Image (cartoon, rainbow, N blue to C red):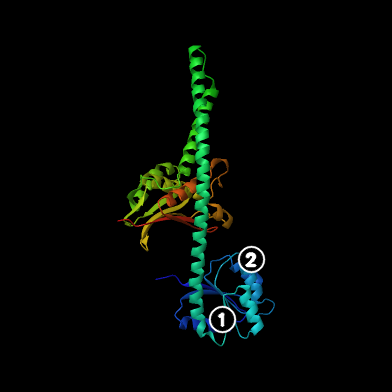
Amino acid sequence: MSAPLRILFIEDREDDMRLVQRELRRGGLVFDSKRVDTAAELDAALAEPWDVILCDYAMPGFGGMAAYAMVKARGLDLPFIMVSGTIGEEAAVEVMRAGVHDFVLKDRTARLVPAIERELVEAQRRDELRRAEATLLRTEKLRALGQMAAGVAHDFKNLLNPLGLHVELVERALRRAGADRPESIGVMREIIQRGVQTIDRLRTFSRIDPEPVAEYVDLAAVAKEAVTMIRPRLHDRPGLDIREELEATGRVRAHGAELVGALVNLLVNAADACGERGVITVRTGVEGGRAWVEVADDGPGMTPDVEARAFEPFFSTKGEQGTGLGLANVFATARRYGGDIHLTTAPGRGAAFQLSYRQGP
């Protein structure tokens, strides 16, 4: 059973809203709703998630076009339908030119349900198109950066290899001379080791195209392995709970080790987001011929600005502790074998990363 629609009424008359609600129920819609009739109330309400907005055209001190402007200023692409007692031809033209999706007269509400259903489908199509365009742009950006990263990794390796050799020669010379090894020798070794780890991350990031090592793996088994690997790292955080909701998914074409690494990365990020206390849930399932695995947390969630840049290479919210390559690598791992990755988040509502692949034979 699908969740009820969330409908926001911008209407100054309670009785008019109830008449519209009656028509919606008669048309078979199941919904929850809220009514606002001032700019301040609308501004507060727009912080909540809505599926449809039904707005009166003329209200004392606050008109429908002003309400629509507030919705657009928030960057929200929601079905916005004017429901008016009277609206002249010029006003109707102005409404449609502004981008309002439809208008319905209050004495002809029989077509309101079909209008809502149509606009919900159109909104879903627009959302899918935006996601496809964003994925294409992100993939091309990663491809270009991957080529650059491969060259940078090669150059770094050529620098670090002789540097490590010279450190070893200095250490041997000190031993032959009977001198104590300076502390700086150990520091230099640690720096070189961190440099090698950075090169490994860059080399992993640069592998955008599919490789011949792909295999058919069970997403539920891969998820179980990733959880098993991460649990020991969290033993000092007893307030952090990892829950498994693993359903059979069949097999997908991917690389098992890379996929485990991607899920471990997501689990580490989820643990960092939750801090000392919280719940991380790992789920698997099948929908529309695609198998999926999801890592969700009940942490603070992301602001829209951070969400928009989450998969951007070298972007990090962890300060000096973050490289900004973790989620970029997760995205590359998903796309390398024809998979998709989808992020669902909002401030105060945690974050959920879902990787999906077409089911294999």
Please tell me which of labels 1 and 2 falls first in the chain: 1
Q: Disc 1 residue type?
A: Met
Q: Are marks 1 and 2 in contact (CB under 8 Å)?
A: no
Density class for disc 1 (Cα within 10 Å; few <14, some 14-19, many ≥20) is many
As helix, strand or loop, the secondary structure at mark 1 comes to helix
Q: Is residue 57 visible?
A: no
Q: Residue furthest bottom?
A: 107
Q: Disc 2 residue type?
A: Ala
- The residue identified by callout 1 is 17
Q: Residue 75 location, x and y as percent?
A: 60, 64
Task: Give the spatial CA distance, label 1 vs label 2.
Answer: 25 Å
Q: Residue 160 location, x and y as percent?
A: 51, 29
Does 119 sit left or right of 232 as displayed?
right
Density class for disc 2 (Cα within 10 Å; few <14, some 14-19, many ≥20) is few
Could you tell me which residue is drawn at 49 percent across and 52 percent down? 139
Q: Quadrant of residue 293?
A: bottom left
- 252 to 191, vertically: above or below: below
Does 132 sit left or right of 215 as displayed?
right
